[in-house]
């Protein structure tokens, strides 16, 4: 099946979970989560689950598992915890938890980011994968990086990703 045929069967309106991962942010200081909510809803999709969790492996895993288990969630976005600081454990946690990885997501994000910030892009450990037949994309916390990811990757491919993760029987 051609790329165009795949995309033509993809859902047009999606339901997202947005999870902020941070030891220092709360609802009043979080910038990444609100940016993602605005980006998703501005593109005509819905946010059906919103959460802020500490940068602790158990909390991240529990939040992501809750999100993929939620019947009203098609795709999970996380923001924060993707750096290389000792407290940033999102990458390790998701890599262990995901059923399968989407290596091209992180690779493409870093390639696009390189055009804007140069070699500093090596500090980003954005990761994507599938868990329980739902797509999970871990993004940085910076609104500038989030804008790049959402505009250049996520919003362009979200429906296609969801359809592929669901498999042929559910894609329609």
Image (cartoon, grey):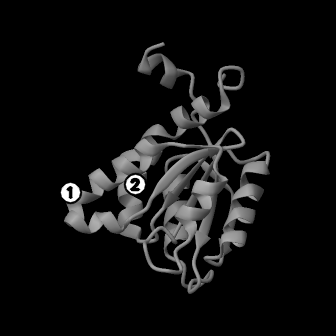
In percent of width and height, residue 61 lies at 70, 63
- Tell me which label, 2 or 1, sits earlier in the chain: 1
- In this rendered view, identify the residue nearer to me: 84 or 160: 84
Q: Is residue 153 left or right of residue 26?
A: left
User: How many other residues sit within 10 Å of disc 1, few (<14), some (14-19) or many (≥20)?
Assistant: few
Asked where in the image residue 110 lies, by quadrant, the reply is bottom left
Image quarter hosting the C terminus: top right
Q: Which residue is mark 1?
A: 115
Res 113 seen here: yes
User: How many other residues sit within 10 Å of disc 2, few (<14), some (14-19) or many (≥20)?
Assistant: many
Whether 118 is drawn above or below 95: the answer is below
Whether 10 is drawn above or below 47: the answer is above
Res. 149 mark: 2
**Residue at the image position 41 percent from the left and 51 percent from the top:** 106
**Residue at the image position 53 percent from the left and 62 percent from the top:** 91
In percent of width and height, residue 86 lies at 49, 80
Res. 36 mark: none
- In this rendered view, identify the residue nearer to me: 70 or 11: 70
Q: Is residue 105 left or right of residue 110?
A: right
**Residue at the image position 49 percent from the left and 25 percent from the top:** 7
Res 38 seen here: no
């Amino acid at each position: 099946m051609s790329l165009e045929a795949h995309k033509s069967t993809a859902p047009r309106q999606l339901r997202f979970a947005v999870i902020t991962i941070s030891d220092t942010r709360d609802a009043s200081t979080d910038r990444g989560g609100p940016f993602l909510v605005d980006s998703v809803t501005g593109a005509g999709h819905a946010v059906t689950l919103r959460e802020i969790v500490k940068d602790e492996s158990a909390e991240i895993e529990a939040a992501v598992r809750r999100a993929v288990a939620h019947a009203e969630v098609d795709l999970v976005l996380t923001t924060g915890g993707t750096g290389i600081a000792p407290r940033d454990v999102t990458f390790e946690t998701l890599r262990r938890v995901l059923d399968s990885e989407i290596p091209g997501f992180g690779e493409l994000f870093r390639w696009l980011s390189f055009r804007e910030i140069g070699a500093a892009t090596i500090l980003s450990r954005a990761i994507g994968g599938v868990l329980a037949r739902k797509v999970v994309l871990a993004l940085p916390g910076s609104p500038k990086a989030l804008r790049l990811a959402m505009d250049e990757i996520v919003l362009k491919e979200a429906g296609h990703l969801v359809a592929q993760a669901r498999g042929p029987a559910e894609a329609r």
